[in-house]
């Protein structure tokens, strides 16, 4: 029985690795294709988007590589003044730096992303405003995680609660669930069992079918 379980796990991991390699190759080929096209706003926004997707493939395993790729995406977005791409690149750079344990450097990039989202959420364009608010919630959450990892729990709570507010207004239940869980863990670290149980209960009620 144990041998069967181990064999199944190994097969699953092999299939996952194969699928991941296929995705990486596809993104790599698209980047190569886009770089050969004449420069234009459409080409550069597509290139930046693809570079950022490619960078995410290395975010946990090879963060230095991910940082190089997202930095290139940032420069491409800046070239055509594409705010969404600039914000995404800054956000990803913050995450990748955090993966290396450089939380202070990550916070600087997150702050740059927040400035982009705060500006764009005032846009008169409905789609731009919606995307900015969605991304702002993600960045607020990531800042909370950074402070959490640094042991600065009051600051972590502040950003988690801000992220929760954005997720609740957008009715993003997945985002709410993640924030509830993180806040519960912070209160656990603070030995505040009463508040911990409140947020665990909120999480439980939210995920009920």
Image: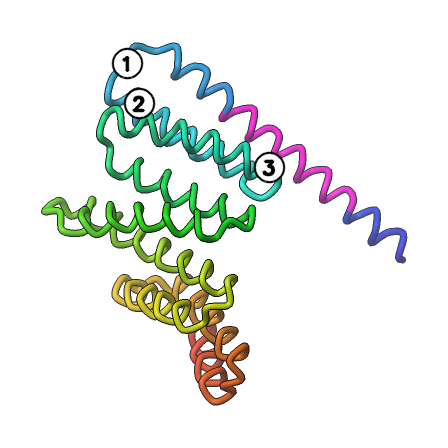
**Spot occupied by residue 37 in the image (x, y as percentages of width and height):** 34, 11
Instruction: Check disc 3: other Cα within 10 Å, few if <14, some if 14-19, many if 20+.
Output: some
Residue picked out by circle 1: 39
Tag 2 and tag 3, C-beta contact below 8 Å: no
First to last magenta residue range: 10-27
Gap in angstroms between the C-alphas marked 3 and 1: 30 Å
- Which quadrant of the structure image shows residue 63? top right
Classify 13 as above or below 201.
above
Residue picked out by circle 3: 62
Residue found at x 52% / y 87%: 193
Q: Secondary structure at mark 3?
A: loop
Tag 3 and tag 1, C-beta contact below 8 Å: no
Instruction: Check disc 2: other Cα within 10 Å, few if <14, some if 14-19, many if 20+.
Output: many
Residue found at x 43% / y 14%: 33
**Spot occupied by residue 147 in the image (x, y as percentages of width and height):** 45, 62
Instruction: Check disc 1: other Cα within 10 Å, few if <14, some if 14-19, many if 20+.
Output: few
**Spot occupied by residue 105 in the image (x, y as percentages of width and height):** 44, 47
Residue picked out by circle 2: 44
| Residue 19 located left or right of residue 136 | right
Residue extending farthest to the bottom is 194
- Which quadrant of the structure image shows residue 205? bottom left
Q: Which numbered disc flags the more N-terminal residue, 3 or 1?
A: 1
């Amino acid at each position: 029985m144990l041998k069967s379980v181990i064999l199944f796990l190994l097969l699953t991991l092999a299939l996952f690795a194969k699928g991941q390699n296929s995705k990486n190759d596809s993104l790599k080929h698209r980047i190569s294709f886009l770089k050969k096209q004449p420069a234009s706003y459409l080409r550069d926004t597509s290139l930046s988007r693809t570079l950022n997707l490619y960078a995410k493939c290395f975010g946990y395993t090879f963060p230095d590589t991910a940082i190089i790729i997202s930095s290139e995406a940032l420069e491409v977005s800046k070239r055509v003044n594409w705010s969404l791409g600039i914000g995404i690149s800054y956000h990803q750079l913050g995450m990748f730096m955090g993966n290396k344990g450089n939380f202070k450097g990550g916070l600087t990039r997150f702050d740059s992303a927040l400035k982009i989202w705060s500006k764009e959420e005032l846009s008169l364009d409905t789609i731009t405003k919606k995307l900015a608010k969605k991304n702002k919630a993600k960045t607020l959450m990531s800042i909370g995680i950074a402070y959490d990892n640094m042991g600065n729990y009051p600051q972590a709570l502040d950003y988690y609660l801000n992220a929760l507010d954005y997720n609740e207004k957008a009715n993003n239940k997945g985002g709410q669930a993640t924030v509830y869980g993180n806040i519960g863990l912070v209160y656990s670290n603070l030995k505040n069992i009463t508040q911990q149980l409140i947020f665990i209960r909120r999480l439980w009620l939210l995920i009920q079918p």
